[in-house]
Image (cartoon, rainbow, N blue to C red):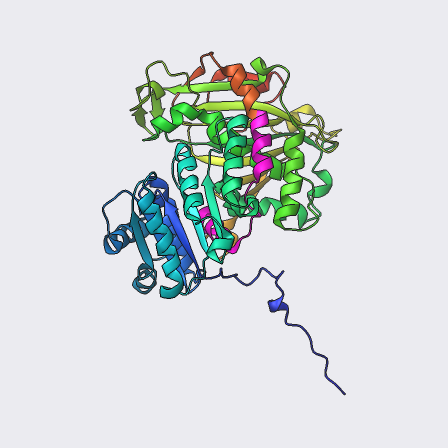
Amino acid sequence: MTPTVRANPLRDPRDRRLPRLPDPCALVVFGVTGDLARKKLIPAVYDLANRGLLPPGFVLLGFARRDWDDDSFAEVLREAAQKGARTPFREEVWDRLASSVKFVQGSFNDDQAFDTLAKTLLDLEHSHGIPGNAAFYLSIPPSAFPVVLKQMQRTGMASNEASGGWRRVVVEKPFGHDQESARALNELVDDVFTAPDVFRIDHYLGKETVQNLLALRFANTLFEPIWNSHFVDSVQITMAEDVGIGTRAGFYDETGAARDVLQNHLLQLLALTAMEEPVSFNAEAIRYEKLKILRAVSLPDDLASYAVRGQYEQGWLAGQRVRGYLEEDGVPAGSRTETFAAVRLGIETRRWAGVPFYLRTGKRLPRRVTEIAISFKPAPHLPFDATDTSELGHNQLVVRVQPDEGVTLKFGSKVPGSAMEVRNVAMDFLFGEAFTESLPEAYERLILDVLLGDATLFPNNAEVIESWRVIDPMEDFWAGSAPHLYRAGTWGPAAADEMLARDGRCWRRP
C-alpha cells in the first residue's frame, strides 16, 4: 500500500509562524546623519540582524554630505546601534553587519555623487551577491524629495528592469501639506517608481498593539457583535506627547499638529478601528476596507464648535518649568501654529451612523500616551437604586498603543460588603506580562516588510488623498485665526473640554 504523502504545513507560504527572510538586497538611506536614522533606523537594522531576520547578502548604504569613508561611517552606526538598540549588543552580530556597510558622500544636486551611488549598487552583485535588489529610504525633508527622485530616475536606479531585481522607495510623512501637494508628490513618486514599489511609511501601523486591534476584532466572537452603533456610544482616539517641539521648529511651525499627526497617525487608527472585516489578511484587502472608511468620514457642520486647536504656553511638567511654544528656539514671534488639535468626526456607514469619533493630539500634555477608547452605551435598564450606581460609568474597551501596550476592559462590579454598590473595575491585558518576547520596535517590522515587499501596513496613494480631504477644510477654517492657549502640563485648552460637554460627554483621562 502506497503511504500517504502529506504536505509540510511549515512550508505553506501563507503560514506566518516562521519568520520570512528577504532576498539578498541593499538598504540605501538618504539623510543617514539625521535624528530619525540615528535613533530609529540604524537601531532597527541592528535588531533585525540580531534576530537573524536579514539575509546573508545584505548591505547598508548611507548617502550624506559628510566627509566619511566606510570605516568612519561604520563607527557612527556602531554608536547609534549601541545607544538605541532594543536587543542586547553583541560584537559578533555587529562585526557581521559592519562588514557590509558602505558610504557615498554627496549632496542631492550632485550628479557625480548619484552616478557613484548607482555604480556602487551595480558592484554589489559581484562583491556581495546582491542581484540588483535595493530599497531607498528617504529620511530627508519633503522639500528634497523631488530632486532625489529625479536623480534616481536619471541614473536608472529606480528601474526594476534596468537593475535586474526589485527597486523600492520608502517615503516618510508628511505626504504633502494638503491634498493638492499630496497628489503632485504621489504622481512624481509613482512616475519614478512603479506604484506597488512605493511604501508610504506610518510608523504607528508597525506597532504590535495596532496590529493586535485586527486580531482583537476578527479573531474573537466576543467583540464583533457589539462593534457598531447599536452598542457603541462614542470612540476617542488620543495621541498625547509630554515633550515640546525640540529642534524641529523649522518643520513644525510650517506643519502643525493637525498635519503632523491627525492627517496620518490618527486617521489611520480610526480606519483600523472602524473598518469592516477584510476578505483576507493581505495588503490589498486591508487597504480596500480602510479606504472605504476614510471615504465615509464626515466633518461636523459646525467647525467652530467641533474643531479645536490650541498652542501651549509656559507651565509645569513633571516638576519642571517648561517654556511656551513661542519661547521655543526657532519659533517665529507671533506664530499661530497649533500644537494641539481636536475634532469630532462621523462615519457615514450603517455600522457607525450616529457614533461620534473624537480625535485629539497635542504636545506638552501631562504624559505620553496613545490609545483608542471605545465607550459603550449604558444598559437600557438598571434594576438598582440611583445611589447604588452613582460610581458606575460606561463600559469601555481601551486599546493602549503606547507606552503600556495592552488592552483594558472596564465594567461594573459589586463592591464587597453588605450594601449593594456597583462601581467600575478594570480587567487588564499587558503584552509585557502575557508574552515572553519583548515587543519589537515599529521600524523593525516596517523595514523588514519593505525588504519583503509586504505592503499590508503601508497606506497607499488613495488613503493619503482621502486623509487630506478630511484635514484641508479644517485648515482652511482655522486660517487666520489664533489658536486657544493652554498651559504646558494640562490636557489642552478648555475649548476641547467644552466640545465634548456640548454632547454630554467628557474626555477620558489616560
Left or right position of 294 against 206:
right
Is residue 153 inside the magenta stretch?
no
Q: Is residue 86 above or below residue 408?
A: below
Q: Quadrant of residue 485?
A: top left
Residue depicted at 32% across the width and 65% down the height:
92
Quarter of the picture containing the N terminus is bottom right
Q: Position of residue 490 (x, y in %)?
A: 43, 23
User: Where does the image place residue 206, in percent across and percent down from the top left?
Assistant: 51, 46
The residue sitting at the bottom extreme is 1
Q: Is residue 414 in sight in this rendering? A: no
Q: Main secondary structure of the magenta part?
A: helix
In the rendered view, tell whether residue 15 sits above or below residue 235. Answer: below
Q: Is residue 467 left or right of residue 163?
A: right
Report whether 217 appears left or right of 1: left
Residue at position x 38%, y 55% from top? 121
| Visible residue check, residue 223 | yes
Residue at the farthest top position: 481
- Given residues 389 and 487, the one toward you in this image is 487
Q: What's the magenta region?
A: 442-470
**Which residue is at a point 31% across and 31% down the rendered structure image?**
247
Q: Nearer the viewer, residue 183 or 399?
A: 183
- Pinpoint residue 448: horizontal percent, then vertical percent: 48, 53
